[in-house]
C-alpha cells in the first residue's frame, strides 16, 4: 500500500476551505463570524452546557481569550450563559435558537457549494470521495477536538 502524501492532503484541505470562503463572499443572510467564534460555537454545539475553561482546553487557547469570544457571541445572541446549579461560580454555555438557525444556513450553503463542485466530477471521482469520507472523518477525529 502506498503512503498518503500528508503535505498534499494538507494543501488540498486548506485550498478547499479557501475555495469555500471565496465563494462565500456573496451577501449572506447570516453575519460572518471569525474562525475562533465558529470553533467556540462548535464546542458548545458538541457539548451543550460546557464551560469556558473546557473550551479553552479543547481549543488550546487561554481561558481569558475564550471568555472574550464568548462575551461577543452572547452579545450577538448566539450563546446564552446559565449558572451551574452545582457550582454557582461556574457558567454553562448553550446555543441559542438564533445560533442553531445560523449554523443550519451555513451548513446548507456549504453543502450547496460542494454539491455544485461534485457535479463537475465524473462518477469515478465522486465514488472515490464517497469512499474516502469515513477515513477523512477518522483523520479529523485523530487530529483532536475542536473541529467545526
Image (cartoon, rainbow, N blue to C red):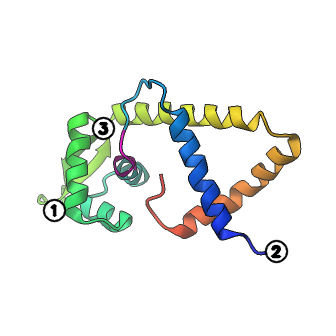
Circle 2/circle 1 CB separation < 8 Å: no
How many C-alpha atoms fall within 10 Å of the one at disc 1: few (<14), some, or many (≥20)?
Answer: few
Residue 41 visible, this angle: yes
Q: Is residue 68 magenta?
A: no
Q: Residue at x 56, y 69 (%)?
A: 142
Q: Is residue 107 visible?
A: no
Residue, disc 3: 78
Q: Is 68 placed left or right of 120 in the picture? A: left
- Mark before the other along the chain sequence, 2 or 1: 2
As measured in the structure, the alpha-carbon distance from the residue carrying label 2 to the one carrying label 1 is 53 Å
Determine which of the numbered discs, if any, sits on residue 101 in the image: none
SS at mark 1? loop
Q: What stretch is highlighted in magenta?
A: 33-38
In front: label 2 or label 1: 2
Picture layout, residue 56 above or below residue 75: below
Please state which of residues 62 and 8 is positioned toward the viewer in this rendering.
Answer: 8
> How many other residues sit within 10 Å of disc 3, few (<14), some (14-19) or many (≥20)?
many
Q: Where 18 falls versus 101 (above or below)?
A: below
On the image, numbered disc 2 is attached to which residue? 2
Of residues 80 and 106, the one drawn nearer to the viewer in this rendering: 106
Residue 139 lies, in percent from the top left, at 62, 65
Residue 105, given in percent of the width and then of the height, sits at 48, 30
Disc 1 target residue = 87
- The Cα–Cα distance between marks 3 and 2, rounded to whole angstroms, is 45 Å
Mark positioned earlier in the residue sequence (3 or 1): 3
Q: Which residue is drawn at 61% across and 36% down?
A: 111
Spatial CA distance of label 3 from label 1 is: 24 Å
94, above or below 102, in the image: below
In this view, 124 is above or below 7:
above
Amino acid at each position: 500500500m502506498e503512503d498518503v502524501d500528508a503535505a498534499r492532503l494538507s494543501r488540498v484541505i486548506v485550498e478547499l476551505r479557501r475555495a469555500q470562503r471565496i465563494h462565500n463572499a456573496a451577501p449572506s443572510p447570516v453575519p460572518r463570524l471569525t474562525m475562533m467564534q465558529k470553533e467556540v460555537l462548535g464546542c458548545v454545539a458538541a457539548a451543550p452546557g460546557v464551560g469556558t475553561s473546557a473550551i479553552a482546553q479543547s481549543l488550546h487557547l487561554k481561558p481569558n481569550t475564550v471568555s472574550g469570544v464568548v462575551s461577543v457571541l452572547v452579545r450577538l445572541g448566539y450563546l446564552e450563559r446559565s449558572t451551574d446549579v452545582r457550582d454557582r461560580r461556574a457558567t454553562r454555555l448553550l446555543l441559542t435558537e438564533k445560533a442553531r438557525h445560523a449554523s443550519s444556513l451555513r451548513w446548507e450553503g456549504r453543502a450547496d457549494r460542494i454539491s455544485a463542485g461534485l457535479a463537475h466530477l465524473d462518477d469515478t471521482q465522486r465514488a472515490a470521495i464517497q469512499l474516502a469520507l469515513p477515513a477523512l472523518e477518522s483523520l479529523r477525529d485523530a487530529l483532536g477536538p475542536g473541529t467545526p
